[in-house]
Amino acid sequence: MSTGSRPRVVLGVAGGIAAYKACELLRRLTESGHEVRVVPTASALNFVGAATWSALSGQPVATGVWDAVHEVPHVRIGQNADVVVVAPATADMLAKAAHGLADDLLTNTLLTARCPVIFAPAMHTEMWEHPATVENVATLRRRGAIVIEPAVGRLTGKDTGKGRLPDPEQIFQVVRRTLVRGSSVPDLAGRHVVVTAGGTREPLDPVRFLGNRSSGKQGYALARTAIARGARVTLIEANTGLPDPAGADVVHVGTALDLRDAVVEAAEDADCVVMAAAVADFRPATRVDGKIKKTDAEPEPIALVKNPDILAELARDRLRPGQVVVGFAAETDDVLANGRAKLARKGCDLLVVNRVGEELTFGTDVNEAIVLAADGSETPVPHGPKEDLADVVWDLVVPRFA
Ligand code: CTP
């Protein structure tokens, strides 16, 4: 592990066209004070040459184990790292890592590293979905590696699908969170968590809806931190307009009923469900097909019907035995008393209670809350980034996986 103040990152680059995007990740890491040693594979150098990696990192670059042998680089580089991130990780690299092959400097480094290891895969959809790759990814995750889900979009040729390297900024955020936590065994590795985010919109007609002011930022912070702690994350987002976080399976929904369908499907094999979305309690009783036109007459009142309480249903049904269910409560008055009553009413394991108002919480990057647990404990979380609150939530969820 590093003894200096600058965190030591090993950036492994495997042979895929997305190697050029790793240059941006490298810059982001060095500019924010990380010491980065780039270890490309020989095939990666077909895409981006050693001179580029060396100039951008300010460090020597080698691909094999026969350079500078007296320094025993095949052991030292891995041993000295605070985090190893492989971006792009090709199907071949995932296979080698899963099987412990060590035929070059990067694969040797992966075997000697005792720090967190992050893989950011990039490949064609067919390769990502091949049973061999699926098993290799499962093996790596089971051992505690963080394998972030590839993004969906345009691939090398004209085709599109899942397999794009996630946005370098998003990979950077996973690296940063992993370093902040400093844990060598990601405590959510092997877990599937479902997080909902945003606010549902209940349509009145094709152009109007009843909605709310939730930005979704707290739910996204929960997703990002869970990925950095090794979880497989399904993020169900409603109307946030935020970019998909790297490493999550993202489901886009509109209304409370859509959200309920998506959550129930995803929760079947989930270890934990966090309902951070602001779900509309009511929806218009009818959705008018064409735009409602203004006439000289006074408008008709809008009839509403109740939406299902998804959190209460999840807490009651526990779609998987031992599933941990977490709710959020936005309160304007009597925050604690209302929070306790809501926790009992909904039957969830944890309830994150925060005070909201026009200038408080909505749309900002900071939050302040108290987390109430069904066992009576209370954990106050001071004013700070939404990611800090998210990490406290996961800290409280992990011991509840019994
Ligand atoms: N929630 C839900 N389904 C609903 C309404 C809310 O699953 N139909 C979830 C939210 O995702 C959140 C929690 O319940 O996790 C609390 O939401 P809140 O709106 O504060 O609670 P309500 O049940 O609406 O209570 P009240 O209106 O009394 O504040």
Image (spheres, helix red, strand yellow):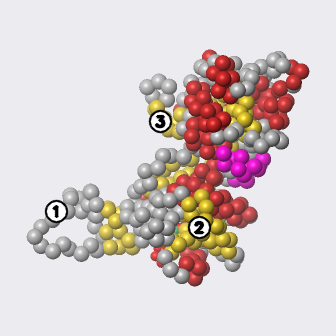
Q: Which residues are magenta?
A: 176-189
Q: Amino acid at mark 1?
A: Lys
- State how far apart marks 2 and 1 are (Cα): 43 Å
Q: Position of residue 66 (x, y in %)?
A: 82, 17
Label 3 sits on what residue type? Gly
* Residue occupying image coordinates x 64% and y 53%: 226
Which callout, 3 or 2, points to the residue nearer the camera? 2
- Between the residue at mark 3 and the residue at mark 2, the CA separation in whole angstroms equals 36 Å
Q: Circle 2: is it few (<14), some (14-19), or many (20+) Cα within 10 Å?
A: many
- Residue 275, by quadrant, is bottom right
Q: Is residue 109 magenta?
A: no
Rounded to the nearest whole Å, what is the CA distance between mark 1 and mark 3?
Answer: 39 Å
Name the residue tied to disc 3.
Answer: 153
Q: Residue at x 64, y 73 (%)?
A: 372
- Earlier residue among tags 3 and 2: 3
Q: Which image quadrant: the C terminus? A: bottom right
- The residue identified by callout 2 is 368
Q: Is residue 333 above or below residue 19?
A: below
Q: Which mark is residue 293?
A: 1
- Mark 3 lies on a secondary structure that is strand
Q: Residues within 10 Å of mark 1 (few under 14, many from 20)?
A: few
Q: Is residue 102 visible?
A: yes
The residue tagged with tag 2: helix, strand or loop?
A: strand
Please give left or right for residue 311 compared with residue 4 in the image: left
